Image (cartoon, grey):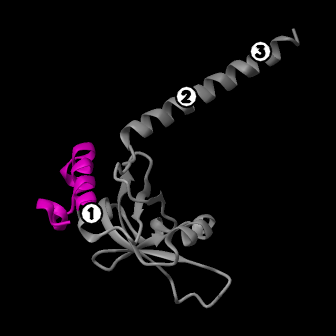
Amino acid sequence: MHFLIPIFAALILYLILGKKIKQEREFNKKYPVYCFNQSFNTWNGKLDDIKYKCNRDDKGVVIFAVRHDDSIDNPEEDVFIVIRDDGKELGRIPRKETVRYKEWSKGNVCTGIGIIHYDETMNKLWADISVLDSEVPDEDSEKAFRQYIEWAEHQFGSTYIPDRYRDNNA
């Protein structure tokens, strides 16, 4: 009889993990991440502190700049903040990524594009972002942003595209 305990435990574990994997696949289908196919260098990631800076009304495509936060008094701590093109602070590069981001960006101010998502069923707010290398020419970044906006509208619908980004005004 004792030999059945590990079998039941394995079965329960299989059912729980199988459900979690299925949920993860469905989530990734619902919220795919854009990959730039251009030859220039990008940094891709998430944002920290977004739940403190944004709300469900901020859902959609965002164009932003990433810069070092000079207001931090601690010289040991690097903080890179993400500021939307209308001036609203959206969050920051995650603390665990700051060393890698600083090396990648060479400390330069960089522009990027991303999507703020809000899922009502999970009451969850997050952002997927792509930051372009500061050496990418403006005309290339504008073209890449237009392509991203078209992709986002196709994937998520027109409600994800703020008016200021419509009609190739990116």
Helix, strand or loop for disc 3: helix
Q: Quadrant of the C terminus?
A: bottom left
Instruction: Say which of marks 1 and 2 sits in front.
Output: 1
Q: Left of 134 or right of it: where is 106? A: right
Helix, strand or loop for disc 2: helix
User: In front here: 154 or 126?
Assistant: 154
Disc number for residue 154: none
The secondary structure that most of the magenta stretch takes on is: helix
Which residue is disc 2 drawn over? Answer: 19
Of the residues under marks 3 and 2, which one precedes in the sequence? 3
Which residue is disc 1 drawn over? Answer: 140
* The residue positioned farthest toward the left in the image shown: 167
Is residue 106 visible to us here? yes
Helix, strand or loop for disc 1: helix
Queried whether the magenta region covers residue 112, the answer comes back as: no
Residue at 31%, 67% in the rendered image: 63
Residue 107, image x, y percentages: 51, 78
Q: Range of the magenta residues?
A: 143-170
Q: Left of 129 or right of it: where is 49? A: right
For the residue marked with disc 2, what is the amino acid?
Lys
For the residue marked with disc 3, what is the amino acid?
Ile
Look at the numbered discs 3 and 2 and tell me whether their residues touch, using CB distance below 8 Å: no
**Residue 67 position (above or below residue 49):** below
Which residue is disc 3 drawn over? Answer: 7
Residue at 24%, 53% in the rendered image: 147
Queried whether the magenta region covers residue 150, the answer comes back as: yes
Of the residues under marks 1 and 2, which one precedes in the sequence? 2
For the residue marked with disc 1, what is the amino acid?
Asp
Residue at 48%, 59% in the rendered image: 46
**Residue 58 position (above or below residue 29):** below
